[in-house]
Amino acid sequence: MGKDKVRIGIIGAGRIGKIHADNLLRNPNAEIVAISDLFAGPELEAWASERGISVVTKDSSELIAMPNIDAVLICSSTDTHVPLIEQAAQAGKHIFCEKPVSMDLFQTEAAVAAVAKAGVKLQIGFNRRFDHNFRRVRSHVLEGTIGDPHILKITSRDPSPPPAEYIRVSGGIFMDMMIHDFDMARYLSGSEVEEVYAKGKVLINPVFAEHGDVDTAIVTLTFANGAIGVIDNSRQAVYGYDQRVEVFGSLGSASADNDHPNTAEISTAAGLMRDKPLHFFLERYNEAYVQETALFIDAIIHDKPVIVDGNDAVQAERIALAAKMSMEQGRPVKMTEVPGASRETQPAN
Amino acid sequence: MGKDKVRIGIIGAGRIGKIHADNLLRNPNAEIVAISDLFAGPELEAWASERGISVVTKDSSELIAMPNIDAVLICSSTDTHVPLIEQAAQAGKHIFCEKPVSMDLFQTEAAVAAVAKAGVKLQIGFNRRFDHNFRRVRSHVLEGTIGDPHILKITSRDPSPPPAEYIRVSGGIFMDMMIHDFDMARYLSGSEVEEVYAKGKVLINPVFAEHGDVDTAIVTLTFANGAIGVIDNSRQAVYGYDQRVEVFGSLGSASADNDHPNTAEISTAAGLMRDKPLHFFLERYNEAYVQETALFIDAIIHDKPVIVDGNDAVQAERIALAAKMSMEQGRPVKMTEVPGASRETQPAN
Amino acid sequence: MGKDKVRIGIIGAGRIGKIHADNLLRNPNAEIVAISDLFAGPELEAWASERGISVVTKDSSELIAMPNIDAVLICSSTDTHVPLIEQAAQAGKHIFCEKPVSMDLFQTEAAVAAVAKAGVKLQIGFNRRFDHNFRRVRSHVLEGTIGDPHILKITSRDPSPPPAEYIRVSGGIFMDMMIHDFDMARYLSGSEVEEVYAKGKVLINPVFAEHGDVDTAIVTLTFANGAIGVIDNSRQAVYGYDQRVEVFGSLGSASADNDHPNTAEISTAAGLMRDKPLHFFLERYNEAYVQETALFIDAIIHDKPVIVDGNDAVQAERIALAAKMSMEQGRPVKMTEVPGASRETQPAN
Amino acid sequence: MGKDKVRIGIIGAGRIGKIHADNLLRNPNAEIVAISDLFAGPELEAWASERGISVVTKDSSELIAMPNIDAVLICSSTDTHVPLIEQAAQAGKHIFCEKPVSMDLFQTEAAVAAVAKAGVKLQIGFNRRFDHNFRRVRSHVLEGTIGDPHILKITSRDPSPPPAEYIRVSGGIFMDMMIHDFDMARYLSGSEVEEVYAKGKVLINPVFAEHGDVDTAIVTLTFANGAIGVIDNSRQAVYGYDQRVEVFGSLGSASADNDHPNTAEISTAAGLMRDKPLHFFLERYNEAYVQETALFIDAIIHDKPVIVDGNDAVQAERIALAAKMSMEQGRPVKMTEVPGASRETQPAN
């Protein structure tokens, strides 16, 4: 864009908004100009002032309208994503939006269309694409180390369930949690999903059943390139955040294990022990969060495609819908049964 | 049985029959009296003579009729299993039979009924139940270390596909290969399977398609205790025999990794390297084979239940049938749709 | 100090000085006021201006004299450390100084005495004390998990030798490289060294011999608490920076393995492979560098003892001298033979 | 020798003698003809009869004189080794002798000379040369994977100390325990030791001090090929038998970790746990014991050099003497100070 610094506005000053802010503050190519939050007040003003962020507002429209802002980070609640994307696109701002774009596929597609029309960039907050482990597995797949992918396996388990109020509005395990894994499945396999079979259970807490949700699920995927895959999710792994993947193919297998806070191992009369994996996403994906906004900035500055775009949001949401449908109807669901268009190609990266 | 030595006749002198023979020769509580094989000749006679096995015959009936034989090991081809079990049961011999008992569930059940009627013992050659790794995972599940099982995962991949002539008569991937994993699923979860969904593909060699078979498969299981599980099979893992399991539950997870020929690790400018896992079942389950016949002998001498009995054969075959049906019909199959009775309890061990 | 922000001056704008600067810029409790470097010029001024550091000077004395500076970081060449420490102490500034304090033990002791007299804090740049792995091993030792320490083992190998010009002035392998391990030995064992035996060789590059140095060494240590230990150093581990420790005791053993850039493992027909350890100290101790200055700031703000103080510098240098003497004379050397006083107690932390 | 079966007499029916017997009973190329033991009685006769060993005697001379014996295994107490070797050599029997050959280097050399004169084979019971892990490390060294060896590290720790009566006659930690590691050092480095420095401590049990022995030791070795090495021994690793090696060289490093009874890993809220290493030498070196006598038999049948010969016994004993001398005198000891001749070449294998 002919400039060496991208001027940023952040919409939504919750936990993830603040993390992105702190990461961008250390990025010499970014400058945070403004932050908006419905509940902005003295506390946020103090927080912003400490960081040299000059504008704090309750009004996201005001922020979007600021002429000295090149790009916005949408970190507000899911129901606000689509209107904000449309507004920002119309204002010619590049957009980083947290996942999922929306609970309504048609709205998501409308937002993506608005972005396309405006010719701005849209990057989706699928942070795992920026994880050192998964990127390394992906690079092995791309380089052909494991040949043609045959079987893809993803394990993704949270350390503890979210609170009931969150469960109520989360959109369910497939749209809220496994959506990351659906994106990862497309990313690691390099292929689109064609069929989904989902099996879910309430094994951890009946509160999930009260909201028509499950807390434990296994989903089988069939890919366009012939591979098959399986994802398992649990809302409660008492030993910490469990994030592992494996891509098995004609020439071998590439897998990634969890990250741990240290490599210390203790040997005693009771056995060998080491510490649990990094606790949760903030710890595990700490560096991935840094990378994802850094590469967003980089894509803007050098006018390169973003690593995860609007279509990636659409496709992951479509798979989540298929999984929900499959679980409810007790049968495999073809992606052609799900509204919205498949797109043949993924962005290269 | 009031004796301290079990006198054995071995039916079928193929590879696995000879392995069992050599293992039993080192067992002070066993004595091999006779061996039969359709193709018995000078070679087998020399082999038997070296080992002090005095009777060699082409006629399994002759062997079964020998009064100085307490138990038979049926290691002949699958189609002979049922008549041999019935014959041996009628003759009052204890029976060890390789898996699967038959390709026909009704025949398997008939054989099991004959055994029950005769009051002899029948142990099935599900050798993996005797593997050091899987037994340790099972012991953790039984001891409650991981709480209630929620998710069960089994990876089972062969180093290379069998020859075409074997594929033709194998009964298909579910009855021939994954049947071990179905048994392991029951063993590790401590629960019966209620529903099966199978997805299979031909990704390695079109010869599998020619015989209506697949070479790559993912199967989702639902258990009576509420847990869900997934098994993945491939006929060709170029890096060797891949045999891993995981049981994830309310209090944690127990998993077993592959065995390797050594622990040596090499660090060079190219990276860190270690040798592939043990090549195939003969290497990996070498000690499990020793254990399974040793415990069969032990069960006879001390009149204890065998660790894997006729019902285990029936249930594993029923799951294999359900998986085949599921794959062919493209839908989950309830175990109640499969002929044959479920049995509520598994033998304790 | 009744303030919540420590005002910092950095002396020496080489690689490590700039790393500390960038880390402190992200620290809300620190403010970098000035930076000095003998070769300060437009480049450094641009670098400082980007970071909001207002004063850039060639004259460290000017920086030390600035009344709005609370603490200095001495990151200049080793020969300048002692006069700068003395000057800064006299000016009442707290001091962070890179290791070694000097090549001359008497000077080091004089500097430490000047610090004591001035009542300021002095923290030494033994960055490994802040490493996540070693801290975890240390915590296990302190908590008694492994009982009384019996054997301590440290492996410390660089990925490649320094350039010849560096070797010439480095002070030799014991004072330049193994000094970190001597400090780690005291830190992990919680005890002082009483005797040293060193064996060194030139196996990598004859240039070391030209400067009276070695490139490969094994040193045996005897500790006051009865434990014995061994350190091995190599200037060239082609597979990367090798930094491992083990403390073995009456109740078990605590060890730390290397850190790796990712957990990805590849299984192919050639074997199992993973990437080399993190390349060198900048990668491996990246987070330790952040921690060490953060805790220095913290010690100043809350007037707490620093984690690694002047005596730690003195003792590590004394052990390095003993090692050199031992290697040259081909015999074990008692610490009582080395000039300078042992101190009985280490700072608790 | 033109025969396909080696006829064996076993001298000494203690634990190791019986293990060798049971291993050889499964070896189709060996036949155990006789066993002798000073305390032979009904129990040993029953044991032998069960195994088809026809001759049981108290008199080793009688056994050695039997014309239908080709080779003897000397498994009696250390003080009997030398006279038995000499007697057996004179009788033209091939000899397998447990380590150490004797506590007196001159006697050991005399025994080796007697063997050379008689032209029979002598294999020493350094069982670790037959361990799968160490052989793999050695093969990497031989193949040049790690380049020229620079640093050799051996950790060898027993799970618990021997009884006091054993300590009294053991010959001390260097001759009794570390002698295995001295042999391993020569084996893995492919080079002879030139200098030894030993540091020992009594940290586990004062009973060691009562017998002039130590229970914890670190020994530094200098090799003829320029490499340096270190061995650490402890008589008590509460977490089990700890047997690890590493050879570090110009092109990389080859290391071997412990063997474990299983690969099961448990993840709970308390951390990650796995079972301790295999308990002690009988478990860890179980297969190595099978291999060592199998290869002894093989060497006889095909008239090949044994893998570990009389000179290996002499050299390991010389290093043990040097270590003892070094510890007692508190200084490094050159191997030229130790009686007995170095031999330039090791047998290839």
Image (cartoon, coloured by chain):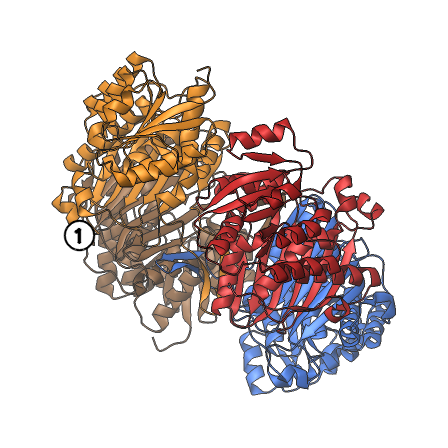
Chain colours: A brown, B orange, C blue, D red
Q: Nearer the viewer, residue D127 or C207?
A: D127
> Image check: A214 left or right of C3?
left
Q: Nearer the viewer, residue B308 or A241?
A: B308
Residue at the extreme left: B210
Disc 1 residue crowd, few under 14, some 14–19, many 20+, Cα 10 Å: few
Q: Tell me if residue C63 comes above or below residue B296 in the rendering.
A: below
> Image check: B166 left or right of C254?
left
Q: Residue at 69% of width from left, 42% of height from top?
A: D160
Q: Residue at 38% of width from left, 69% of height from top?
A: A298
Where, quadrant-wise, is the N terminus of chain C in this rendering?
A: bottom right
Report the label total: 1
Q: Nearer the viewer, residue A241 or C255?
A: C255
Q: Tell me if residue D68 comes above or below residue A26 in the rendering.
A: above
Specify the quadrant of the image occupied by residue D64: top right
Q: Position of residue A21 (x, y in %)?
A: 47, 60
What chain does badge 1 belong to?
Answer: A
Q: Nearer the viewer, residue C347 or A127?
A: C347
Q: Position of residue D240 (x, y in %)?
A: 62, 43
Q: Position of residue A84 (x, y in %)?
A: 32, 54
Q: Which residue lies under the disc numbered 1?
A: A341
Residue B240 visible to the viewer: yes
Q: Residue at 21% of width from left, 23% of height from top?
A: B83
Q: Amino acid at mark 1?
A: Ala
Q: Position of residue B153 (x, y in %)?
A: 37, 39
SS of the residue under disc 1: loop
Residue C130 visible to the viewer: no
